[in-house]
Image (cartoon, rainbow, N blue to C red):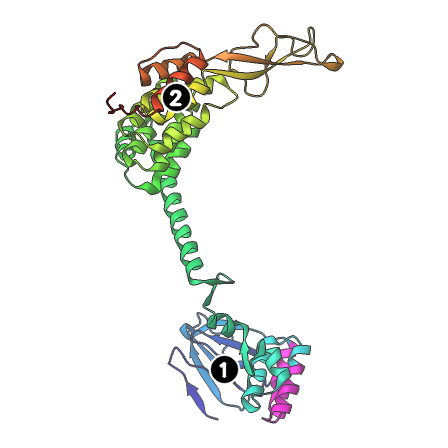
């Protein structure tokens, strides 16, 4: 009886039959497998596998060559027994492929289907089973068709090269943003400890635009004003449109005046059209405190394009809800956002149908809007919106040409 010693790591051995119920499948690191009975089961620690295969030969494998050892299912054992009995012809190999399908041996089935089309290139059943379709008289798989059309398989989906590039860029962007979030979380944890100076320096000196998302989240969610002031410094240094937008939002939404004013100080250094557009949009907010804060921002931006919207926002109308006396909300309050902290204004009260809360509409003059207009124009028509409109229209008229004709 011959003994074979295998030393190559990429060896592929496929044996013809399983000799006994003790047979195992030895899956090799380099691909392929050896099927046979393990003779040195008791060896410990294991250095080798000595395997007796179907023809009586012995195969020796180093442990580094074997990725997995598994006991074959009964169907696999039966397959190894009957496989040599099928002729190497297209009809016989098709029959064996069908047997494999019935016994759920899909990998073995594919081997025999491919052998069928090697023997008979136009075997339609085998072609269809392998995913081929006939296109313009030629057999082609879906993968081949999609590849010819310029598609590539990307994470289980067929996509154009441009789509893959966009997806990869997005993936890299999100990975970089996540990395910065982890850094900021770590540095935030150092604040209040002996590592605070290093944390402050790390945050202040950030210049990577990939950090904007994490800094924005910190500016929005961190409960400590000193930490938020650090994030403002970093965002101002990065100075991208996204960073400026984050500062503009905080200049209105932050509850701490120092934080709001610090945002305005940074935004004033480099006036951006997108920031002006953001403030202009906020002039229509249903909360008149937001309207006034937006006007303060526009006053700092000094952009003439905001004069028209500011005139429209001199007096704004807001809804208020007045509760029924003795009801659940007898003290009154705002409807929606309303005028934060201002309560319901007097006048215009009438009970709604059914005795429920009364909804009133109240015109409110916005002092910060007037201040912004005065600062931008050097004029002051108080809250006379019509006078402001007349003046503004006059500024936009071209000067009349002089009549050079002589009488």
- Which of the pair 237/385 is nearer the observer? 385
Residue 243 visible in the current orientation: yes
Determine whether the residue tagged by mark 1 lies in a helix, strand or loop.
strand
Q: Position of residue 229 (x, y in %)?
A: 33, 25
Residue 231 picture quarter: top left
| 348 left or right of 355 in image | left
Q: Looking at this view, is 77 or 305 the one in front?
A: 305
In front: label 2 or label 1: 2
The boundaries of the magenta stretch are 74-99
Mark 1: few/some/many CA within 10 Å (<14, 14-19, 20+): many
Is 125 in front, or is 150? 150
Compared with 349, 111 (above or below) is below
Q: Which residue is mark 2?
A: 393
| Spatial separation of the CA atoms under disc 2 and disc 1 | 98 Å
Which numbered marker is on residue 362?
none
Tell me which corner region of the image, top left, top right, bottom left or bottom right, holds residue 76. bottom right
Percent x, y for residue 77?
62, 81
How far across and down, in percent of the image, does residue 10 sit? Answer: 40, 78
Q: Position of residue 27 (x, y in %)?
A: 49, 75
The dot on residue 51 is 1
Determine the main secondary structure of the stretch shown in magenta.
Answer: helix
């Amino acid at each position: 009886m011959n003994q074979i010693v295998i030393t190559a790591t990429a060896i592929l051995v496929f044996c013809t039959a399983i000799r006994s119920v003790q047979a195992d499948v030895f899956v090799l690191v380099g691909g392929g497998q050896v099927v046979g009975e393990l003779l040195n089961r008791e060896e410990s620690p294991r250095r080798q596998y000595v395997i007796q295969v179907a023809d009586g030969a012995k195969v020796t494998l180093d442990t580094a060559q074997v990725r997995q050892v598994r006991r074959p299912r009964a169907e696999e054992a039966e397959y190894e027994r009957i496989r040599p009995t099928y002729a190497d012809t297209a009809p016989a190999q098709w029959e064996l492929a069908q047997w494999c399908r019935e016994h759920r041996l899909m990998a073995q089935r594919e081997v025999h289907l491919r052998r069928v089309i090697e023997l008979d290139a136009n075997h339609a059943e085998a072609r269809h089973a392998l995913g081929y379709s006939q296109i313009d008289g030629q057999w082609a798989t879906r993968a081949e068709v999609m590849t010819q059309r310029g598609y590539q398989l990307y994470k289980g989906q067929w996509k154009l090269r441009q789509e893959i590039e966009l997806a990869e860029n997005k993936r890299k962007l999100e990975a970089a943003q996540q990395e910065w979030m982890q850094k900021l979380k770590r540095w935030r944890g150092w604040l209040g400890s002996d590592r605070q100076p290093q944390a402050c320096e790390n945050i202040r000196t950030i210049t990577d635009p990939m950090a904007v998302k994490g800094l924005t989240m910190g500016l929005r969610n961190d409960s400590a004003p000193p930490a938020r002031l650090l994030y403002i410094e970093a965002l101002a240094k990065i100075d991208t449109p996204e960073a400026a937008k984050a500062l503009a939002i905080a200049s209105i939404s932050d509850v701490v005046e120092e934080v709001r004013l610090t945002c305005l100080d940074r935004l004033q250094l480099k006036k951006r059209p997108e920031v002006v557009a953001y403030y202009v949009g906020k002039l229509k907010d249903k909360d008149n405190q937001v309207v006034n804060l937006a006007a303060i921002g526009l006053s700092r931006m000094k952009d003439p394009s905001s004069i028209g919207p500011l005139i429209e926002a001199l007096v704004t109308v807001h809804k208020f809800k007045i509760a029924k006396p003795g009801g659940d909300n007898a003290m009154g309050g705002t409807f929606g956002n309303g005028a934060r902290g201002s309560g319901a204004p007097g006048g215009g009260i009438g009970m709604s149908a059914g005795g429920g809360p009364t909804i009133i509409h109240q015109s409110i003059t916005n002092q910060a809007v007037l201040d912004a207009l005065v600062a931008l124009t050097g004029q002051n028509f108080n809250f006379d919106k019509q006078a402001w409109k007349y003046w503004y229209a006059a500024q936009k008229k071209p000067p009349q040409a002089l009549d050079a004709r002589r009488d």
